[in-house]
Amino acid sequence: MSKRVVVTGMGIYSCLGTSIDQVRDSLYKGESGIIFDPIRKAYGYRSALTGMVARPDLKPLLSRRQRMGMHEPAEYAYMSTHQALLQAGLDVDFLETTETGIIFGNDSTAASVVEASDKVREKKDTTLIGSGAIFQNMNSTVNMNLSTILKLRGINFTLSAACASGSHAIGMGYLMISQGLQDRVICGGAQEINQEAMSSFDGLGTFSVRESDPGKASRPFDRDRDGLIPSGGAATVILESYDEAIRRGAPILAEVVGYGFSSNGEHISNPNIEGQVRAMRMAMRANAIRTDQIDYINAHATSTAVGDSSEARAIYELFGGNVPVSSTKSMTGHECWMAGASEIVYSILMMQNDFIAPNINFENPDEDSARINIIGQTVQRKFDCFLSNSFGFGGTNSALILRKPGE
Amino acid sequence: MYVNDEKIAFEEIIEGVREFLAEEFEIDPSDILPENSLKETLDLDSLDYVDLVVLIEEHLNIKLTGEDFKGIVTFSDFYSLVRQKLGR
């Protein structure tokens, strides 16, 4: 028999804010976190737009040795995880004497690799790179740093699945707990923000060039969109079995009730409606969730014509045109490896605070977005259950369903 | 590099070494005394020796290897190693 899985803590470090309260307010107000980054322009970017969050100063929080192996992904993830553990009432003393796992989504460490390579090119001697680089350079950097700092003793791996990494990480943690293999797993997603990480993506010509008006540039589902905007930071959720959460007296923020996945098996960058529908259907199947029970859909929609249209069609095919839909990427930009996790945090915040955050900049629908119910302005509304989509390069699809905690 | 200036006393160079070691390893410079253990005072593990090599190269422009640290126990031993490598 599968176990119930609940969220007992969450943390966020994003361009909408570096605390739960800040992010809740930004979502409610429909504030954009997008800026023009002159460094990117000088570097050779076609578009210098990005979501931005400052690198945290970890010196007061961690020892030198603990910090040495950390670059942006691990630093951001430490910040969001620190918040989540506090909310869940967990500390290192507890973690090192129990079995807690970590499954984090991350799919690049570009800046740290470039920095290490530059040093070797300059010095012609690998022994002068320093000890931290290897632990910054590997894709599992978040896992290896956080599991060591937090003294974790359970499952420990990184999940790389392009822009669905964070979502699959939560899905995988959910499966681990529901199958009884773990009581508790720290899940999330991290995304570095720097010119090294996103230059090859910019080179595809898929980023918005509305540089004169950064806050208006990310416009998922809008007819006049001209591309996505990269972003980053980190988001964490603490997943626990319902029984364990009750035993600990932990706050129960939401319950994970569905995880669906699929692979398109087609083009490396183009989406596929059938694959998206299969993932959403699978997420609803395990707990026999009906389409009319989904009160809100947090769309993957990134502000590209092809991506937004295919998702609008997939949502319409499965749910019809009534369920409220918004893409918080209209405010955050595309948080890539982190997005699947951050959008769970954003959606839980909405569910807890009785509102649906707007899909800002949605001014004119196109043929496909006109058929679904896109929320362009903040709506004050209690809701009980949401679905969050994440789709990535390589045709990887993930859908998660969470609902308000019940008895 | 200032260390190549023969007019600079070796003691001055060692004072500089104490400063950058204290800053990098985040300890009080007054704990760096000639008779104290290098490893224990700086709390060095095997990875930290890699960073020590980098630091010495950056600040003193001399290249040490892991082999060079064999037999180095105190800061005094370490300063002797630096002196030898600098040809002082």
Image (cartoon, coloured by chain):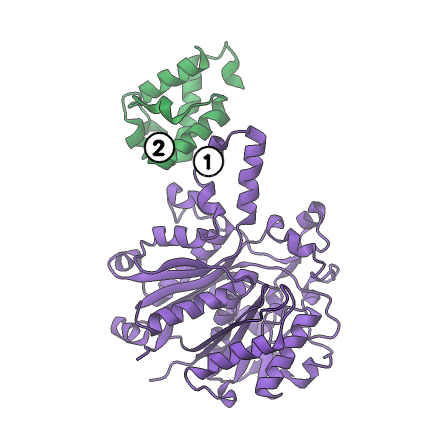
Chain colours: A purple, B green
Nearer the observer, A16 or A103: A103
Badge nearest the viewer, 1 or 2: 1
Left-right relation of A128 to A230: left
Same-chain check, marks 1 and 2: no
SS under mark 2:
loop
- Report which residue position mark 2 lands on: B28
Left-right relation of B82 to A311: left
- Say few, some or many: other residues with alpha carbon within 10 Å of mark 2 (under 14 / 14 to 19 / 20 or more): some
Picture residue at 36% right of the left edge, 65% below the top: A185
Where residue A222 appears, as percent x and y from the top left, is 71, 75
Nearer the observer, A337 or A213: A337
What amino acid is labelled 2 in the image? Asp
Mark yes or no: residue A163 visible. Answer: yes
Where residue A38 appears, as percent x and y from the top left, is 69, 49
Left-right relation of A282 to A369: left
Picture residue at 49% right of the left edge, 32% below the top: A126
**Label 1: chain letter:** A
Where residue A372 appears, as percent x and y from the top left, is 64, 84
Could you say which disc has been placed on residue B74 in the image?
Answer: none
Location of residue A8 with respect to A280 vertically, above or below = above
Mark yes or no: residue A8 visible. Answer: no
State if disc 2 and disc 1 touch (CB < 8 Å). Answer: no
Q: CA distance from mark 1 to mark 2?
A: 23 Å
Picture residue at 62% right of the left edge, 72% below the top: A301
Location of residue A344 with respect to B55 vertically, above or below = below
- Report which residue position mark 1 lands on: A130
What amino acid is labelled 1 in the image? Gly
